[in-house]
Image (cartoon, rainbow, N blue to C red):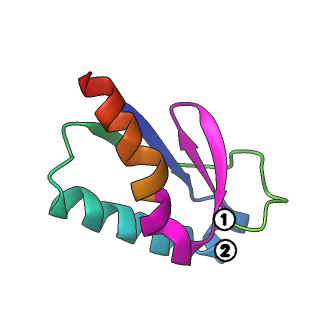
Amino acid sequence: MVKLNVCIGSACHIKGSYNIIQTFQQLLEERKLHDSIDFKASFCMKSCNNSGVSISVNGETYDVQPERAEGFFDEVILPLLTAEEV
């Protein structure tokens, strides 16, 4: 199971964490991935100086702009699901 956390601390909220959460929720629903991804919101991930929203995938932190959320999902998260199936 992939662990996916989106920061909802003050700085990330201002940078668009709500939009990323909405995008991820929509993708999880459309692709029926609720059983494969443990998706949660998290408070400050201590990466407030990043230009985007802090997102943790299996413990690794990424800096994601809201407009790149779907691309990030497809490029980073989906390959992890495929790797788990092998």
Q: Which element type, helix, strand or loop, lies under badge 2?
A: helix
CA gap, disc 1 and disc 2 = 5 Å
Q: Pointer 2: what residue?
A: 15
User: In the figure, 20 relative to 72: above or below?
Assistant: below
User: In the figure, 67 relative to 21: above or below?
Assistant: below
**Which residues fall within the magenta stretch?**
53-72
Residue at the farthest right position? 49
- Give the x, y percent position of residue 23: 37, 70
Q: Nearer the viewer, residue 36 or 21?
A: 36
Direction from residue 52 to residue 6 in the image, left or right: left
- Residue at x 55% of width, y 67% of height: 17
Please, what is the three-letter code of the amino acid marked with disc 2?
A: Lys
Can the viewer see residue 71 in this picture? yes
Can the viewer see residue 39 in this picture? no
Please, what is the three-letter code of the amino acid marked with disc 1?
A: Cys
In magenta stretch: residue 67: yes
| Numbered-mark total | 2
Residue at the farthest front position? 86
- Give the x, y percent position of residue 26: 27, 67
* Pointers 1 and 2 in contact (C-beta within 8 Å): yes
State which quarter of the image contains the C terminus.
top left
Query: Which image quarter: residue 73?
Result: bottom left
Q: Pointer 1: what residue?
A: 12
Q: Which element type, helix, strand or loop, lies under badge 1?
A: helix
- Residue at x 54% of width, y 71% of height: 68
Q: Nearer the viewer, residue 86 or 44?
A: 86
- Residue at x 47% of width, y 75% of height: 19
